């Protein structure tokens, strides 16, 4: 308890003589500077290299002074790579795998440092994709995406150990550049999008912005749609230099199907006497499959400077989601290895959440030491209703498929639960700067409670749980006069687990810890050899209390699982001499199950987690005439082999994919061509078991015509 109090309150221990200090590298700007900064940041975000982020520390901190490997994916990078989904947006990032880059409308499936990340929107948590009830993140509506690697619980609360992906919504701004775009290409894709905004009064204190998108498209999976309507209006009021209020809202209607077409290893990875299964093989059923989602969000962001160097910020969002999901999944391969047995799934869901994060930031000095102090409280309330039915579906021949009628499962026969939960967190942070040393200490106490009601249970259908947890983070960075910044950090995490053991004992949270050490290099602003940010780091993560199958009764779980991940990450981004822009990364990681209820799994690598990844994308623009400009870019993505099942009986081979981008600009008009997997390589993206392998998408090409005004 003393340690908890020390970490929470130690940030505010200072000598009796405290004086207000001027803004530093990590301090917020003055009101006049604050407005100028927003214009400057827009200019930076129009390049591939960002200079700062507020996600890692919840304060505006330069990336080279952030003691953590953080990737900021700017709007320019989203546009360059034609990011059609969150999975595609995070390509070329170190330590991040995306399970084959499939455009899956159900959400993001992948890992950071070997663990599934949590997805955030504007700094607050969204539901994950585990039950397919994830909040859709449309890249067209984003200003940037921040990839934070490692434990973030000291500021964000409960979550996975590997890291988080935080999407940042577009907001009204004084330097708004209006854009309209039309896109067409593979899979019969037709899409129109608009990003419009401006001022509602001559004082420019009331600004508006509207982002909208409508799409009609198939997917690489045969007869599976990906149609979408997305609108996101926002309004900003800045009556003076001290106050800034932004209202954010969005609505999305997604009418699609599941691109997760599961096939057996025999016939895809492994030889079969019947030959190789077609890449266009549909293992589900086009007449039955549906993934239909309606979601709406509304919230606000408030910034108010109530004294010189002191401000209060509050973010709030309410989100609602309705889901209808029908899918036919693969159960097993028949004895003759020609057909699969299948199961039909019928799922509906309803999700409501309220998130509220309030924090105060201030700047003081204690002698020669400058403090950037942060004190906050955040609250989240969730309600989830999940209804799921399953029943056997007709077998399907993999080589001459005949799709017979699917009998619908009985509604809610398998799962019929209502779950409510709340999380309240109190956190504090002190960023201390003495000469060129930067020490950051963060601590947070969380109070979580949940109630799960099983409507199908005849008795003991209510599971109530309460968990309190303290998490912390401490890091030290030294900035040398020549731009190198070595750092080291230690952090912890926790994640509540819903349910009880066979003996009716409630699960305890998983707990994780991480050690990270690295070095960053940022070229000087006037350097002739380019404008780069280079990061190299090593990490060691351990998570315990993971749920594993109970050897006494496999219908229950026990908490004996432990997983470790160790590795090295290298990342470089920015501009080289000759105006060549690059995005480069390399990852080597050893992810191992160190404890398990199944002896054969101990020492094994989890499925779909690569040991090695590397990527490089380079582009260059050329000014042809005063009005014409052209650019060409190309990239390669390498993913090492992965385990295809547990215990490991086969591996999925490594993958190498070639991407291309080309564009031509005339004044404010642009035509852009994007291609992925240009060699049209046929390979298996990933397997999670012997009958759950998926082909990767083949070659795809898209053309976008846009105009700015």
Image (cartoon, rainbow, N blue to C red):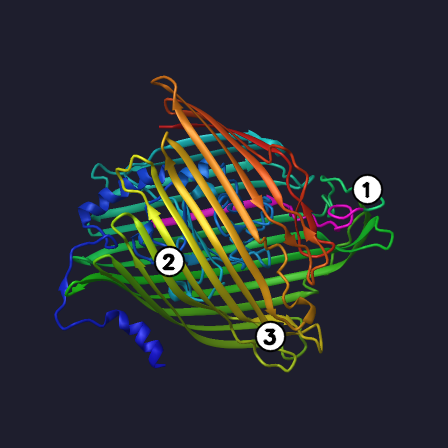
Helix or strand or loop: what does disc 3 sit on? strand
Residue 126 shows in this picture: yes
- Range drawn in magenta: 247-271
The residue under label 3 is 560
Place residue 124 in its image quadrant. bottom left
Q: Is residue 121 visible?
A: no
Look at 42% across and 40% down and name the residue there. Answer: 211
The crowding category of the residue bearing disc 2, from other C-alpha atoms within 10 Å (few below 14, some 14 to 19, many at least 20), is: many
Kindly identify the residue that appears in the image at 20 percent across and 52 percent down: 242
Left or right: residue 41 compared with residue 397 = left
Sequence-wise, which precedes: disc 1 or disc 3? 1
Residue 148, horizontal then vertical, whole percent: 43, 55
Reading the chain from its start, which is encountered first: label 3 or label 2? 2
Residue drawn at 31 percent across, 76 percent down: 6
Vertical comparison of 652 with 11: above or below? above
Residue 483 vs 416, above or below: the answer is above
1 or 2: tag closer to the N-terminus:
1
Mark 3, residues whose alpha carbon is within 10 Å: few (<14), some, or many (≥20)? Answer: some
Q: Which mark is residue 197?
A: none
Q: Position of residue 539 (x, y in %)?
A: 46, 60
In the rendered image of this protein, does residue 47 appear above or below residue 594?
above
The kind of secondary structure the magenta stretch mainly shows is loop
Q: Quadrant of the N terminus?
A: bottom left
Element carrying mark 2: strand
Question: What residue would you read off at disc 1?
Answer: 275
Q: Is residue 266 magenta?
A: yes
* Label 1, label 3: how far apart the Cα atoms are: 42 Å
Q: Is residue 529 magenta?
A: no
Q: Are marks 1 and 3 in contact (CB under 8 Å)?
A: no
Which residue is label 2 attached to? 316
Closer to viewer: mark 3 or mark 2: 3
Residue 549, by quadrant, is bottom right
């Amino acid at each position: 308890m003393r340690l908890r109090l020390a970490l929470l309150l130690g940030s505010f221990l200072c000598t009796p003589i405290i004086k207000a200090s001027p803004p530093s590298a990590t301090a917020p700007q003055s009101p006049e500077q604050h407005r100028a900064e927003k214009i400057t940041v827009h200019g930076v975000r129009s390049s591939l290299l960002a200079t700062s982020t507020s996600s890692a520390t919840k304060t505006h901190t330069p990336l080279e002074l952030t003691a953590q490997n953080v990737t900021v994916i700017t709007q320019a990078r989203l546009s360059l790579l034609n990011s059609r989904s969150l999975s595609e947006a995070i390509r070329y990032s170190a330590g991040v795998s995306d399970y084959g880059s499939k455009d899956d409308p159900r959400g993001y499936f992948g890992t950071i440092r070997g663990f599934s990340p949590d997805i955030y929107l504007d700094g607050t948590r969204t539901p994950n994709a585990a039950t397919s009830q994830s909040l859709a993140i449309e890249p067209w509506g984003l200003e940037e995406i921040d990839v934070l690697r490692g434990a973030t619980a000291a500021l964000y609360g409960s979550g996975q150990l590997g890291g988080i992906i935080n999407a940042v919504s577009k907001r009204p701004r004084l330097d708004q550049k209006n854009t309209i775009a039309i896109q067409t290409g593979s899979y019969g894709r037709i899409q129109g999008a608009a990003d419009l905004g401006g001022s509602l009064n001559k004082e420019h204190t009331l600004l508006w912005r509207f982002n909208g998108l409508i799409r009609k498209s198939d997917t690489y999976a045969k007869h599976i749609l990906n149609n979408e309507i997305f609108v996101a209006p926002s309004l900003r009021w800045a009556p003076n230099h001290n106050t800034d209020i932004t209202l954010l809202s969005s609505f999305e209607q997604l009418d699609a199907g599941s691109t997760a077409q599961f096939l057996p290893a025999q016939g895809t990875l492994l030889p079969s006497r019947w030959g190789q299964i077609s890449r266009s093989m549909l293992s589900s059923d086009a007449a039955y499959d549906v993934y239909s989602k309606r979601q709406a969000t509304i919230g606000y962001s408030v910034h108010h400077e109530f004294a010189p160097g002191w401000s209060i910020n509050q973010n709030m969002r309410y989100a609602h989601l309705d889901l209808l999901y029908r899918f036919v999944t693969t159960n097993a391969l028949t004895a003759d290895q020609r057909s699969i047995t299948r199961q039909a799934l019928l799922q509906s869901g309803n999700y409501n959440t309220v998130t509220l994060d309030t924090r105060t930031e201030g700047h003081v000095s204690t002698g020669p030491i400058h403090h950037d102090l942060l004190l906050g409280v955040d609250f989240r309330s969730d309600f989830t209703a999940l209804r799921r039915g399953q029943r056997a579906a007709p077998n399907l021949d993999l080589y001459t498929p005949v799709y017979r009628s699917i009998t619908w499962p009985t509604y809610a026969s398998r799962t019929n639960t209502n779950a409510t939960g709340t999380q309240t967190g109190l956190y504090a942070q002190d960023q201390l700067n003495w000469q060129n040393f930067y020490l950051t200490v963060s601590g947070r106490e969380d109070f979580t409670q949940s109630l799960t009601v099983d409507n199908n249970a005849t008795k003991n259908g209510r599971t109530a749980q309460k968990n309190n947890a303290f998490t912390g983070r401490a890091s030290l960075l030294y900035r040398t006069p020549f731009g190198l910044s070595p750092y080291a950090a230690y952090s912890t995490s926790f994640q509540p687990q819903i349910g009880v053991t066979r003996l009716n004992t409630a699960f305890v949270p998983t707990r994780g810890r991480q050690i990270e050490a690295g070095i960053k290099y940022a070229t000087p602003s006037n350097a002739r050899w380019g404008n780069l940010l280079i990061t190299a780091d090593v990490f060691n993560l351990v998570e315990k209390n993971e749920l594993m199958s109970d050897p006494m009764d496999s219908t229950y779980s026990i908490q004996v699982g432990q997983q470790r991940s160790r590795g090295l990450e290298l990342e470089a981004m920015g501009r080289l001499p000759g105006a060549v822009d690059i995005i480069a990364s390399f990852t080597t990681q050893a992810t191992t199950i160190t404890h398990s209820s199944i002896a054969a799994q101990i020492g094994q690598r989890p499925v779909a987690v690569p040991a090695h990844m590397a990527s490089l994308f380079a582009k260059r623009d050329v000014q042809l005439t005063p009005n014409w400009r052209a650019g060409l870019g190309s990239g390669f993505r390498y993913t090492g082999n992965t385990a295809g099942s547990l215990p490991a009986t086969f591996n999925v081979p490594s993958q190498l994919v070639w991407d291309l981008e080309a564009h031509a600009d005339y004044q404010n008009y642009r035509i852009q061509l994007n291609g992925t997997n240009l060699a049209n390589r046929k390979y298996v993206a990933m397997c999670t078991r012997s009958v759950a392998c998926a082909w990767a998408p083949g070659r795809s090409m898209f053309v976008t015509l846009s105009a700015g005004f």
